[in-house]
């Protein structure tokens, strides 16, 4: 604009700080799900899927009827974040609620067909390839609205999916009713899903596939909030009350359980200073040293074999020179 040529700027971009996700405990999740209200039980079913499958809010709202497979307990997520598809499991505890919801959804669809307003928008160019697919039950939204609306692009009337904002408001209201101190949103249930799986021993690769993460480093953030990670380490403050008598009693009980000296336990080994062999150390002596550590004696500095003192040279087996 000003006609000034600027030199090349090799500036460093500021890195976005990494924040730890908010995770609810299983007890808090149970209290939260019991406090969800609204939508004639629809929001409670949707929040149960958010926590039970790890779906994002938009992914849950845009589910179609044919994406749900109750025979194999699978749920297919179409065109998720990054345009990727994935398969997640369906909680078996929600099977009865999902069957009732499908039956009610079938009744709504039959009424829409009778009224000639059973339109559902199709993704991409499927409307031109399959003109009648928009009125089929499999392409209907699983969690549809209670009222029919008109599509502004095509002018057809049908049922669109639930507004994601209404689901977010129901989640916020349920967190207030459950008196939770955390800031709870729809994505908090996704974080809790991944963290609780990690605490139960599920490997990170499986959690990455369930969440749809492209990189494993994104999934590794949950290791910082899981109880198996740094949060699961016992603080040294909690170990101050452990007395030496308790250690001796535990060792004595272990030796008595294994038959005393007749069936000794595996002893820790140490290296001998002379021969380099492994010598066993008595368990009683180990316990005594732990409970009553003795002062460490000062040892003379070790010298290398064949080395000499300072100022002298090692003797050589050489013959005197002949005159």
Image: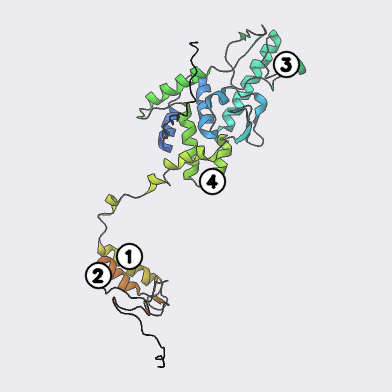
Q: Nearer the viewer, residue 256 or 54?
A: 54
Say whether disc 1 or disc 2 marks the residue closer to the N-terminus: 1
Q: From the image, state whether disc 1 or disc 4 is nearer to you.
A: 4
Q: Is there a contact, CB below 8 Å, between mark 2 and mark 3?
A: no
Q: Which residue is mark 4?
A: 203
Residue 61 lies left or right of residue 22; in this view the side is: right
Q: Which residue is mark 2?
A: 296
Q: Nearer the viewer, residue 65 or 104?
A: 65
Q: Which residue is mark 3?
A: 127
Separation of residues labelled 2 and 3 (CA atoms): 84 Å
Residue at 57 percent of width and 22 percent of height: 61
Instruction: Indicate the quadrant where residue 309 lies.
Output: bottom left
Residue 6: x and y in percent read 48, 20
Label 1, residues with CA under 10 Å away: few <14, some 14-19, many ≥20:
few
Q: Nearer the viewer, residue 224 or 139?
A: 224
Residue 86 lies left or right of residue 320; in this view the side is: right
Q: Is residue 23 above or below residue 319?
A: above
Residue 131 lies left or right of residue 196; in this view the side is: right
**Disc 2 on helix, strand or loop?**
loop
Label 3, residues with CA under 10 Å away: few <14, some 14-19, many ≥20:
some
Instruction: Indicate the quadrant where residue 248 lies.
Output: bottom left
Residue 307: x and y in percent read 35, 78
Q: Which residue is mark 1?
A: 250
Residue at 46 percent of width and 44 percent of height: 199
Q: Is residue 37 visible?
A: no
Separation of residues labelled 2 and 4 (CA atoms): 45 Å
Q: From the image, state whether disc 1 or disc 2 is nearer to you.
A: 2
Q: Is residue 237 visible?
A: yes
């Amino acid at each position: 604009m000003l006609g000034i040529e600027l030199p090349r700027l090799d500036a460093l971009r500021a890195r976005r700080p990494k924040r730890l996700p908010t995770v609810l405990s299983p007890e808090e999740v149970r209290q939260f799900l019991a406090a969800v209200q609204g939508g004639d039980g629809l929001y409670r079913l949707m929040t149960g899927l958010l926590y039970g499958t790890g779906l994002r809010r938009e992914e849950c709202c845009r589910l179609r009827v044919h994406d749900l497979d109750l025979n194999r307990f699978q749920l297919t997520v179409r065109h998720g974040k990054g345009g990727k598809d994935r398969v997640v499991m369906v909680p078996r505890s929600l099977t009865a609620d999902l069957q009732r919801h499908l039956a009610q959804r079938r009744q709504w669809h039959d009424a829409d067909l009778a009224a000639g307003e059973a339109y559902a928008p199709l993704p991409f160019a499927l409307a031109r390839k399959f003109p009648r697919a928009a009125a089929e039950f499999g392409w209907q939204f699983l969690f549809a609205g209670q009222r029919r609306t008109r599509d502004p692009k095509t002018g057809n009337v049908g049922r669109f999916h639930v507004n994601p904002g209404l689901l977010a408001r129901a989640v916020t209201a349920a967190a207030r009713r459950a008196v939770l101190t955390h800031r709870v949103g729809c994505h908090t249930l996704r974080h809790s899903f991944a963290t609780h799986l990690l605490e139960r021993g599920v490997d990170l690769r499986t959690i990455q596939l369930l969440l749809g993460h492209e990189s494993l480093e994104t999934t590794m953030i949950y290791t910082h909030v899981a109880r198996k990670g740094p949060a699961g380490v016992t603080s040294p403050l909690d170990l101050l009350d452990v007395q030496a008598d308790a250690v001796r009693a535990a060792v004595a009980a272990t030796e008595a359980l294994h038959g005393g000296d007749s069936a000794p336990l595996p002893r820790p080994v140490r290296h001998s200073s002379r021969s380099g062999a492994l010598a066993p150390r008595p368990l009683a002596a180990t316990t005594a040293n732990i409970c009553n550590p003795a002062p460490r004696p000062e040892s003379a500095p070790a010298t290398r074999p064949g080395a000499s003192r300072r100022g002298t040279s090692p003797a050589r087996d050489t013959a005197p020179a002949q005159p």
